[in-house]
Image (spheres, rainbow, N blue to C red):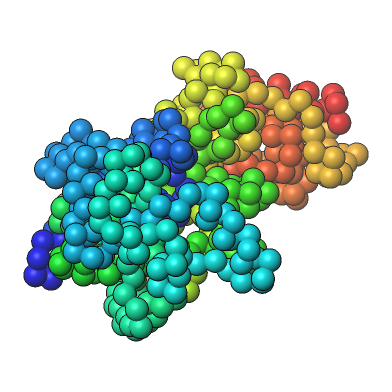
């Protein structure tokens, strides 16, 4: 790659960042880092009607949480600043004028009411109204009136927009890094609005001007922008600028059925589609962070939505992703979102965490349950159960018996409590009472020795023993539990079980 790689994530702050947007940001980040380039963030807020307060901050916070913050953005290394389009407003007019002067654009004075009437009339005839070469000279445009008249109407404050004058009868053969050659007929394109009389550019104009001024080398974005590609390439041509390279990423699809993953799918199946929680008056949308996902796990599963390194490898650190990432290996076909797989990824990252760190994360939950954390070796407890957890929030259900005696006994498991059980448990108590060195290995050796010597079947004692301590036939190695809860508590729980069962 000859020129310096500069790629951008260019969200519109219209709400919380959807997980698809996060994947776009991630792929840009990976591509930039892979090629020693720059990943920057530009806020595309030219459509003020869709502006949502807090969305910009949300985007920044989400990227930061994921560890993929941009190198340049609003208030950070503003080399080509400002990085918020509403702060660049003054700039776009000149470029719109330039296109008017070179004949690549024209003024259109049609009022919204007039356009609506055209649309309705077409609909009535079973047709779709499209504003382009076939009718632009019959509509109220600067193409058919004198420049004096145009100037006068603008000076009078008449409503107008500036539209792109799409060339006629051309087949565009464009290159997309992921899709290869893509073909577009210019006659089928509409003359998109580039600029409005309120002084604001539309997305198309602002996006091209900024990508040029900010020296964007590659445009990596979602597939939904593919239909805009011909207009964008033509705009570069109109300005006489080199176009960046394009790569349109595959859609992220619903876990079941067809179509794009939506927030509703998440609500229905109980998984977040946003990186961070988003609160509005209408309610709370859950976020991966608040659900207890590790940012590394989110990055990892997003990277594999539409990409792999050509092997079966699934677990990648961010550094490994940077190393392995290749836009040429991104798939064309949509990528199915698998919430179960996401949990698996989180599990993989959870078991890699240091036990002491996990214990620290678990502590607030214990405190909430009124457990005196200082009395327990939470790190050890966590080490015994983390293999069975996907999230730190699973820990309580896996460990509650370490901290409190069971209050009920699993019904099915209680069937193992037989006639002879109380007597055996009583004997077990005597055995335990005499153990000096109350450590897991030693207790196990002594109890097993007692069983062998008296020819008592393992199951006859071990299952009721576990049931007494845990309340169910679950949990880690029984003698680890015995050691951790201690002699006194163990005996008291067996006595309680004898009394109740
Ligand atoms: N502002 C557009 C968006 O919201 C950016 C599209 C692009 O990357 O060109 O996704």
Taking depth in this image into account, of 344 and 483 the one nearest to the observer is 344
Quadrant housing the N terminus: bottom left
Is residue 496 rendered to the left or right of residue 44? right
In the figure, 202 relative to 436: above or below? below
Quarter where residue 482 is shown: top right
Quadrant location of the C terminus in the rendered image: top right
- Residue at the outermost right position: 419
Give the x, y percent position of residue 88.
Answer: 23, 40
* Rendered residue at 76%/25% (across/down): 407
**Left of 500 or right of it: where is 3?**
left
Which sits in the foreground, 300 or 172?
172
Question: Which residue: 55% across, 45% down?
Answer: 272
Q: Is residue 210 above or below residue 306?
A: above
Can the viewer see residue 127? yes
Can I make out residue 244 in this image?
Answer: no
Q: Quadrant of residue 182?
A: bottom left
**Left or right of residue 6: residue 367:** right
Pinpoint residue 34: horizontal percent, then vertical percent: 20, 61
35 up-or-down from 15: above or below = below
In the image, residue 440 lies at what x, y percent?
Answer: 53, 37
Q: Nearer the viewer, residue 292 or 329?
A: 329
Q: Residue at x 34, y 78 (%)?
A: 168
Q: Looking at the image, which residue is at 35% across and 64% down?
A: 144
Q: Position of residue 304 (x, y in %)?
A: 42, 63
- Choose top left, top right, bottom left or bottom right for residue 236: bottom left
């Amino acid at each position: 790659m000859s020129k310096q790689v500069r790629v951008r994530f260019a969200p519109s702050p219209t709400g919380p960042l959807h997980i698809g947007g996060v994947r776009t940001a991630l792929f840009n980040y990976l591509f930039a880092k892979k090629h020693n380039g720059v990943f920057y963030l530009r806020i595309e807020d030219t459509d003020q009607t869709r502006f949502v307060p807090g969305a910009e901050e949300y985007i920044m916070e989400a990227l930061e949480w994921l560890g993929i913050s941009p190198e340049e953005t609003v208030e950070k290394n503003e080399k080509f600043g400002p990085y918020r389009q509403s702060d660049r407003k003054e700039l776009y007019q000149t470029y719109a004028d330039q296109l008017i002067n070179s004949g690549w654009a024209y003024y259109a004075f049609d009022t919204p009411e007039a356009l609506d009437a055209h649309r309705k009339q077409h609909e009535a005839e079973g047709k779709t109204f499209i504003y382009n070469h076939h009718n632009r000279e019959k509509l109220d445009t600067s193409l058919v009136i004198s420049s004096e008249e145009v100037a006068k109407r603008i000076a009078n404050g008449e409503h107008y927009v500036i539209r792109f004058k799409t060339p006629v009868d051309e087949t565009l053969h464009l290159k997309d890094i992921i899709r290869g050659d893509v073909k577009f007929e210019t006659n089928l394109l509409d003359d998109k609005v580039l600029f409005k009389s309120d002084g604001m550019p539309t997305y198309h104009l602002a996006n091209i001007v900024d990508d040029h001024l900010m020296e964007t080398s590659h445009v990596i974005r979602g597939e939904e922008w593919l239909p805009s590609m011909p207009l964008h390439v033509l705009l570069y041509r109109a300005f006489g600028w080199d176009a960046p390279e394009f790569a349109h990423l595959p859609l992220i699809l619903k876990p079941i059925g067809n179509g794009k993953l939506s927030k509703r799918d998440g609500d229905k199946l109980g998984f977040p589609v946003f990186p961070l929680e988003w609160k509005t008056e209408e309610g709370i949308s859950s976020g991966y962070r608040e659900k207890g996902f590790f940012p590394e796990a989110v990055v990892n599963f997003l990277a594999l939505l539409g990409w792999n390194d050509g092997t079966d490898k699934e677990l990648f650190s961010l550094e490994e992703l940077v190393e392995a990432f290749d836009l040429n290996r991104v798939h064309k076909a949509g990528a199915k979102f698998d919430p179960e797989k996401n949990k698996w990824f989180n599990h993989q990252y959870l078991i890699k965490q240091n036990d002491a760190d996990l214990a620290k994360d678990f502590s607030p939950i214990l405190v909430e349950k009124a457990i005196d954390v200082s009395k327990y070796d939470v790190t050890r407890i966590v080490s015994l159960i983390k293999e069975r957890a996907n999230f730190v929030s699973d820990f309580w259900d896996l460990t509650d018996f370490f901290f409190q005696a069971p209050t009920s006994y699993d019904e099915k498991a209680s069937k193992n409590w037989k006639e002879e059980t109380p007597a055996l448990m009583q004997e077990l108590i005597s055995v335990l009472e005499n153990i000096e060195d109350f450590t897991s290995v030693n207790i196990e050796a002594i109890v097993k020795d007692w069983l062998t010597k008296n020819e008592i079947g393992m199951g006859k004692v071990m299952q009721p023993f576990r049931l007494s301590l845990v309340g169910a036939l679950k949990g880690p190695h029984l003698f680890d539990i015995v050691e951790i809860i201690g002699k006194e508590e163990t005996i008291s729980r067996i006595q309680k079980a004898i009394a109740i069962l």
